[in-house]
Image (cartoon, coloured by chain):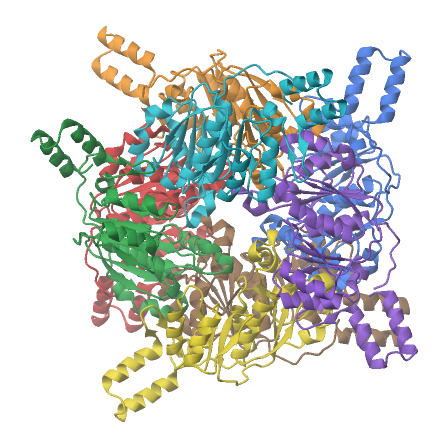
Chain colours: A green, B red, C cyan, D orange, E purple, F blue, G yellow, H brown
Amino acid sequence: MDLKALERLLDAYRTGEIDKTQAAKSIKDLHYEDIGYARVDHSRATRQGFPEVVFGAGKTREQVVGIVEHLVKHAPNILITHTDEGTFGEVRNIVTEAEWHESARLIRIRRDLTDLGVGEIAVVTAGTSDIPVAEEAALTAEAMGNRVKRVWDVGVAGIHRVLAERSLLQSARVAIVAAGMEGALPSVVGGLVSVPVIAVPTSIGYGASFGGVAALLGMLNSCASNVTVVNIDNGFGAGFVASLINRKYEPPKHTN
Amino acid sequence: MDLKALERLLDAYRTGEIDKTQAAKSIKDLHYEDIGYARVDHSRATRQGFPEVVFGAGKTREQVVGIVEHLVKHAPNILITHTDEGTFGEVRNIVTEAEWHESARLIRIRRDLTDLGVGEIAVVTAGTSDIPVAEEAALTAEAMGNRVKRVWDVGVAGIHRVLAERSLLQSARVAIVAAGMEGALPSVVGGLVSVPVIAVPTSIGYGASFGGVAALLGMLNSCASNVTVVNIDNGFGAGFVASLINRKYEPPKHTN
Amino acid sequence: MDLKALERLLDAYRTGEIDKTQAAKSIKDLHYEDIGYARVDHSRATRQGFPEVVFGAGKTREQVVGIVEHLVKHAPNILITHTDEGTFGEVRNIVTEAEWHESARLIRIRRDLTDLGVGEIAVVTAGTSDIPVAEEAALTAEAMGNRVKRVWDVGVAGIHRVLAERSLLQSARVAIVAAGMEGALPSVVGGLVSVPVIAVPTSIGYGASFGGVAALLGMLNSCASNVTVVNIDNGFGAGFVASLINRKYEPPKHTN
Amino acid sequence: MDLKALERLLDAYRTGEIDKTQAAKSIKDLHYEDIGYARVDHSRATRQGFPEVVFGAGKTREQVVGIVEHLVKHAPNILITHTDEGTFGEVRNIVTEAEWHESARLIRIRRDLTDLGVGEIAVVTAGTSDIPVAEEAALTAEAMGNRVKRVWDVGVAGIHRVLAERSLLQSARVAIVAAGMEGALPSVVGGLVSVPVIAVPTSIGYGASFGGVAALLGMLNSCASNVTVVNIDNGFGAGFVASLINRKYEPPKHTN
Amino acid sequence: MDLKALERLLDAYRTGEIDKTQAAKSIKDLHYEDIGYARVDHSRATRQGFPEVVFGAGKTREQVVGIVEHLVKHAPNILITHTDEGTFGEVRNIVTEAEWHESARLIRIRRDLTDLGVGEIAVVTAGTSDIPVAEEAALTAEAMGNRVKRVWDVGVAGIHRVLAERSLLQSARVAIVAAGMEGALPSVVGGLVSVPVIAVPTSIGYGASFGGVAALLGMLNSCASNVTVVNIDNGFGAGFVASLINRKYEPPKHTN
Amino acid sequence: MDLKALERLLDAYRTGEIDKTQAAKSIKDLHYEDIGYARVDHSRATRQGFPEVVFGAGKTREQVVGIVEHLVKHAPNILITHTDEGTFGEVRNIVTEAEWHESARLIRIRRDLTDLGVGEIAVVTAGTSDIPVAEEAALTAEAMGNRVKRVWDVGVAGIHRVLAERSLLQSARVAIVAAGMEGALPSVVGGLVSVPVIAVPTSIGYGASFGGVAALLGMLNSCASNVTVVNIDNGFGAGFVASLINRKYEPPKHTN
Amino acid sequence: MDLKALERLLDAYRTGEIDKTQAAKSIKDLHYEDIGYARVDHSRATRQGFPEVVFGAGKTREQVVGIVEHLVKHAPNILITHTDEGTFGEVRNIVTEAEWHESARLIRIRRDLTDLGVGEIAVVTAGTSDIPVAEEAALTAEAMGNRVKRVWDVGVAGIHRVLAERSLLQSARVAIVAAGMEGALPSVVGGLVSVPVIAVPTSIGYGASFGGVAALLGMLNSCASNVTVVNIDNGFGAGFVASLINRKYEPPKHTN
Amino acid sequence: MDLKALERLLDAYRTGEIDKTQAAKSIKDLHYEDIGYARVDHSRATRQGFPEVVFGAGKTREQVVGIVEHLVKHAPNILITHTDEGTFGEVRNIVTEAEWHESARLIRIRRDLTDLGVGEIAVVTAGTSDIPVAEEAALTAEAMGNRVKRVWDVGVAGIHRVLAERSLLQSARVAIVAAGMEGALPSVVGGLVSVPVIAVPTSIGYGASFGGVAALLGMLNSCASNVTVVNIDNGFGAGFVASLINRKYEPPKHTN
């Protein structure tokens, strides 16, 4: 729960700006709002440092737009992933700052540009086809207040390409590496840097790549000790965790 | 490559303490030593902030001891994982500070106790049977200079147990969560804290747990966005990455 | 076989209302009717407390409608699952009470509203996208004479949402929990209540969710002892079993 | 939390029988006791109608015995599954009523024999080799206050065998069916009865049975609508849920 | 190689009806014809008792028609499976006797109606949705000179339905049983009859049926000893083998 | 049920040889005997042409011997598969004709040597390591009254070896082909003969053979249309079905 | 890096043809060109004897054309695989020699026809449906300077077809064998020849072929020792490696 | 068939050294010898350039020794893989030149040391634990007349280690790369050299390495085009194919 918003509400009640019923309803809504098909979770910003992201797949366009309408009142920055341009059209009617990112198929609302990171986040791909997933990671990290460096198409079969970017990689606070096929790049990057590497298997490949399973297994079995893994094509998750790693550390506030 | 060690060698050569052949050999060895069955990698300390860990499984006892003999000259802290008490006996003959940790089946040499972290690392298990894997993570994190908090047996079927540790979890810089069976605990912990959660699936369970696959899949599909995953039973990897996340951040030195 | 229907037939025969051939044919049909591509099973109502449900997928529209035409003479309540709105149009021509449920893609004929349960059935989802499957369960349970409580979008990553519904859950005779992704919610609900929990894995998720396999495995390995599992997306099955659990218990009649 | 135990403690405190420190510690322990490697969960009896069962596999003998020592003070009936005769020896030193069940490899302490069920539970196996798993289910159900009927070796390849037990099956409140190989028996039993059937796949079989996976898949895909499934070889879980289904229904107490 | 055809050719050559080059080419073609994209195998009739079937999937329409043009000169009966109505249109232009079977998606040319079997072949399905696969089997068996009995929709959840057909099943020389979902019907039929049962798993089902894998595994693990299995949806293969089993046995001719 | 045995019993009762209670018990036992842990199925001989085989794995030695004691009174020929030499020792105490077959790990009692087949059964292996499984098939077929030809070690990598046995293969009524690794031999044999081929995948191989799965899949996908498949290592099943195929065909008796 | 191209550049710089900035940029580009979404790798010709192939799937048409524009300046022969006819239209606008191969869905630019091989490459298929994959291999091998012999439709179920091509196969320097379904042909060819066999599993088949997995496993487990395997449908890879095997061997130049 | 051996036999027959029966038997044995449990294939030397290797696993010690006794008369060099030291003891009694290789668990008889290769074969491992598999490859290649270079422990997490061996790798005619865990090394080596790379996945790893499956999938999906793959742990196969690639090419003899 957002402490400042709570204090504002209590003030408004004491000054008679809102009555008791309104106050009670509003305080409850600070926690989460039940809008029937979803419980919009406004306390997550406090708990996780970022408003709820909307996962578009499996929801109707009306549901997505409805959730955004509720989020937009509390959160400056919002992401809608796995969505389409038609939904973007409707979202832009609500929030004019909404941006459409075609390759990542993602809507981003970014009204707060504060830099929250201690360093930079490197986002790397093995091939050209991995860029959409990597862009999802990069756009997420930017929306969460980070500076991002993009390094595309440096797969291991031409090892000189990634070696050429060694300095860039070694200067980042955390690296995200997206790769399909055999998913070997995170191991190589992991061996070059001394920071955490977040590996994102992509579903790029064919035959025995099994929609990203080969890359996923490769990354889970990485011989580099600094590699952790997120779900196949989960660029958002990688960008999210990288942001938390890069965030300026402050002692916790011990509230709920 | 360790710059100070290199400078010492160059000085020794100029002062005639060592001759040219010795100097060349020693400089090369700073990089890595080829001891036949293994290339002991002394430059990894610079690259990753920690000496090579020895993965004991699949190596003969002689090989493990031989590798340790070479590592021990350069590295204050060493881990040998997936090993046995007999190997410990021989390692202790070389390094008296070696400790044997029965439950994690791990030998630890910890001669440098400097605190390198900015906060604490919470290590959590769902059940009693997950403790050996979690201990591997905790012992690794300590060996890499971190303060660790252990929270055992707070699985989701008795949700009040993990809620009771909410403050402890929320005050950590990073959390490691080890769970077998359905592997649901990282999602719950992930929802309670605003820092990265490293999920470690364990091979605990039976039937359709498939040696940890059920837990692994559960964690990869976590609905909490701050969860990343390491390999089944890979406590070491979780402890390693958590240490890198917790490490005080300094601008990179841009050398090779 | 329905004893009352049998007695009526025998009476009709004795009073000469129907002749011997008609009587024999009708008695046989009480058991099941062979309509070529299907054997419509009227004795199932006696055996299982509910008429045959029609699984629409893999049948032509003509077959579905044909089966319904035979069922509708014997059974007040009928479900057609995995069907489409076009089929609904034709079914409504036969039975005007037919209802179309878009999200569950299900046709329901509900002409008998008797309450057959001892308590209530709670139907719960982890996310918004799981609602279609949960609705199938809820609609089934209602058609079988139960009072149903719906609880949507209380997934484990925001654990306060499910805790907020604790009383509602604890007052049910049985709970159905639908979840995709890691499928962790049944374990948490299972730990909160002392009644059976029927877990329904949904095919919601992506990447390594493998169309619901991750959720299925999570539920099969649940650390809560009161959880049983049905097939992926099988809302109907969950609603069916929950209805049997909630049914008023009467000593069996020991007939065939 | 056990309300009666709480009241006793408060009385004891008021009468001075115990001091404040003791009272506080005891009240906290009513909830759960943290004994280092485990949190023994005494409030589960209230929440689920049964004390915690101890899953023996993956725990040392010392841990199992330690947990039992704490449970035995609060719970009349206790189960230790997946254990061995050596552990039984030590448990019997603590609780003389402990029984050893060789085929199920289970220790049972059963000091409260109250009948808590409304009807009987039928436990059925397809073959002789499935008996150990079915016994685990039957012993669990008895320990939870149920009358159990055992029906062994009525697999589908000799369909007359299960048909011969039709009356017995149809008079039960709930049926548990354990089968390995193709796991077809639950579907047949499901078609014969009008109560819930809990299917337990066993790891019996060879070749493409894959340790019970074939049976598990068969049961999940059962064409009988009243079948739900538990994990491979999970006799305990089946007995537990069957007990909850058979339990006399009372309106919930709405406490936490 | 067809001995009679060979003798005719040799006669034609001796009488001067064809010259040496033609004779050589024709004799070679009796063995197989290389038509570029395919080697049409005319000697298979001798080797297997039936001309080559054309598997339509993965071939262009031109290729299918081209192969049929070559087969039609040597073989009275031909099957084209996994094809479509458009291809049927073109095949009928070549052979007017061609029949289109919509549900099995199969073209059949049946110009030789000789009865080659010693008994009848029973073709059985568990459900209505399994009929297309079963029809493929039945049509194949008929094309190979067998009398076929069709028994549809007698799945195990209503066991009285298959028991009602016991006499029919027990009078067949061989039974084909097609079933999806859990695939249990072959085991039950296997237990009722004393002849071989050929089980055909179908891809009917959803969720954890995995496109027929659950049924396939169930059938491979059948507890009835007289069951063998063919590939998922392979009605043709089942009909083919059943025909060979039902064929009047004659001592082999020992030629190539 | 054995009609002759039944008539004998009825006679004995009428003549007063046995009283009514004995008669009832004996008639029931003709059907099957319930000996507690097993229902010994004497009516199977009528239903399937062979007495029940005892699958030894998963049964205690006492159970195996107990079942044999009951079978031996009704059946001249009995097989106990997946057993050991110790059990053989005890079985020989009951039936002196029992034979121990080390490579197949099978006990055979063969007191009736009548030839029941119309032709011969060829049993073929790809390699030396497949012999134990093939022997199980051959021994079964012999026990069921067949003449068997064994052809060992003719795998496809030396195709001349199987071609050298072409005549032998082409003179059989049915062929059993056991192969591990890639399981290709059944396809080649299937192309050489015009009778049914029963393919038995064996668990021989390593790495990606996955305990016989590679061979199983190869056989299920055989491009030869006359191949059906049994479970991995299921020599018994293959021998059983081959015997039914080879059996002299008689019109069915239409009894139950 | 291409040494001759480098020397030309250095000459051009010395003679003033190009200035220093141009020289530096051009030298760097000899290595690889970074065009934003891709790093076009011109040094690969030196490293691997062939210019980069463009894998079309997962790239936009603009990206494919852009990459080709850069490659075409340095490489005489180029392949674009997994592409479509629309892309071909645009590529032909850039390079008029571009050819479209419909069955393999591949664009080939072949301007250098030098024969680089020591012998011939045989490309073989099991069936007609495997031709597209085999054509990809054959077209690749030709583009890399090899003579190719095509042998289509000689699958193992008609073993005489492949035996008829024995001489052709035995005269090749290396054989490529493409097969779907059970994938047995490489083992048979492997047994007939004494040169390397490259097996290409194709996704042809249905049911338990699992999109080529059955064929892939069959090939990996081949009992012929001279078989290696590439990914499912990877005709390009097979043609590439076969070309390297067939290449005239010259001592390496030891440059980077 | 060995032409020289055949000529010698025919001479011996004409000179009366052997009689007709002996001649016929010996000629047949030149092809293969049927020794009951195996058909020892002496014609393979002609067909594949090497005598049959004996795969020890799944054969009794007597069978292995028996096969060797027959091979040793015709072949100078023999390999027995997957065997043990006890078998070695018995083999050495027959052939004194037999060598025991502990790490590869392989017996080698190497009496012909002729160099048959055009260049060298590089054998590379990612880790120390992969050495046994790589040794099997190296020993095989040597037995087939090749010079071998061993490069151990150059896995990708320390990329400088493999770069340091670049010249050695680039001077080989073919490279074998053995790796477990994620199996990434073949891709990197493949990118560094312009010759074929044979990738051998090893079963080294734990958790989600699934006994080598992760490495196998990684290698099949390699982004380096010059990589082909053999079965998990199949060092022998890799050494065999590498030998055929390295063999001096001669035009084929076109005999059978």
Residue under the image location 29 percent in, 31 percent down: B163
Judging depth in this view, the residue of H10 and E103 nearest the camera is E103
Q: Is C100 drawn above or below residue E240 in the view shown?
A: above
Residue B210 located left or right of residue B65:
right
Q: Is residue H141 visible?
A: no
Location of residue A145 in the rendering, given as x and y in whole percent from the top left corner: 20, 53
Q: Is C181 drawn above or below residue F225 in the view shown?
A: above
Location of residue G158 in the rendering, given as x and y in whole percent from the top left corner: 73, 63
Residue H91 located left or right of residue H222:
right
How many numbered marks does the figure carry? Answer: 0
Q: Quadrant of residue C37?
A: top right
Give the quadrant of the C terminus of chain D.
top left
Give the quadrant of the N terminus of chain D.
top left
Q: Quadrant of residue H230?
A: bottom right
Q: Is H196 drawn above or below residue B78 in the view shown?
A: below
Judging depth in this view, the residue of H228 and F86 nearest the camera is H228
- Spot the residue most to the top: D15
- Spot the residue most to the right: E15
Location of residue G156 in the rendering, given as x and y in whole percent from the top left corner: 70, 62
Judging depth in this view, the residue of E50 and B232 nearest the camera is E50
Q: Is residue D145 visible?
A: yes
- Spot the residue most to the front: C17
Residue under the image location 65 percent in, 22 percent down: D166
Judging depth in this view, the residue of F83 and E39 nearest the camera is E39
- Spot the residue most to the left: A15
Q: Quadrant of residue A130?
A: bottom left
Location of residue G248 in the rendering, given as x and y in whole percent from the top left corner: 54, 81
